[in-house]
Amino acid sequence: MQRRAWVRTLAWLAICSLAVSHSIEARAETDCVGPAQLAHTGVRIAHYFDDAERAARVDDALGFQGSGWFLTPSAIVTIAHVVTAMNLSAEDWKPIEIRDGDRTWWDLARIKRLVGSGTDNLVVLELQTAIPAVRSLSVRSAPLDPDERVVTLAYTAGRSRFVSGRFVHYGDERGAADGAMLEMYDGKDRLAVDYGASGAPVFDCHGRVAAVVAGVLTQTLMLGGEVRVSTAWGMPNVLSVPVQGLRD
């Protein structure tokens, strides 16, 4: 009888431990910003090439798109390789399309300033006409901590997607000290942040922008054809650029 009572006690303690663990995890989830709080934060930006731009290209691309976010109603932050692919400059105003869900604006934009000294800097685009209806975001001043939870609202393949994950470490796989490595996923999908997400804001759990998506880490396997896969679980799969320089 005593042994059965002891076993029941252990089982009860195990159940309580699981309940407490689940409660802590649930509280951690609810303590972080979610899709509702981040609505209308990340935007899709695109530039469609004019006749002269298309004539100068070696491919038949009609334009290029990426992600971004509003620092002010007249300033959008994105990543340098998106701006380069769009053929934007500091001298000429060029038309860009800005999309936030079902809202779309057309505006003229040019490079206002570059931020950072790495291989892929942040870029602040100046808009010729301010858009008062948009949401301007705050910038985090402190570095991220290892395993700190982060989330993003990125336009992957032209569709807005909320993705969560964690900060892993500073310094990218090429040894560049300005990179911030993240592990991002949506359930079992480790390619939830992918093509089109470059320039998207990466938020801490208080809704402050801590970094900007710069690229993803993938490899191609030959499995009866080319199959593109992400990194292994527990490893970084998204490269981002910290935003502290925007506060200068």
Image (cartoon, rainbow, N blue to C red):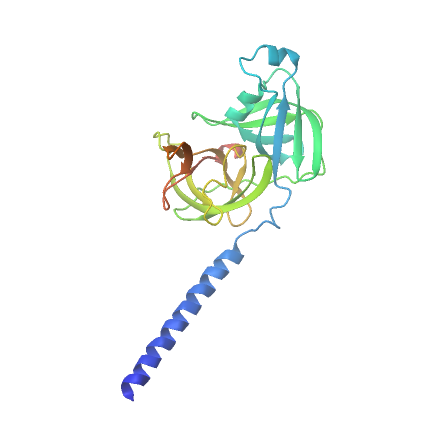
Query: Percent x, y for residue 81?
Result: 50, 24
Q: Tell me what residue is drawn at x 47 percent, y 65 percent.
A: 23
Residue 214 visible in rendering: yes
Q: Is residue 137 above or below residue 22?
A: above
For the N terminus, the image quarter is: bottom left
Q: Is residue 233 above or below residue 107?
A: below
Left or right, 185 with reference to 72: left
Q: Is residue 151 above or below residue 60?
A: below
Quarter assignment of residue 57: top right
The foreground one among 227 and 245 is 227
Residue 179 visible in rendering: no
Task: Please tell me how many numbered marks the rendered image carries.
Answer: 0
Q: Tell me what residue is drawn at x 67 percent, y 28 percent.
A: 97
Left or right, 53 with reference to 210: right
Query: Percent x, y for residue 237?
Result: 41, 39
Query: Percent x, y for residue 113?
Result: 56, 24
Q: Is residue 54 above or below residue 1?
A: above
Query: Percent x, y for residue 28?
Result: 48, 57
Q: Tell me what residue is drawn at x 50 percent, y 61 percent.
A: 27
The foreground one among 76 and 50 is 50
Which residue of the protein is positioned furthest toward the bottom in this rendering?
A: 1
Which residue of the protein is positioned furthest toward the left in this rendering?
A: 3
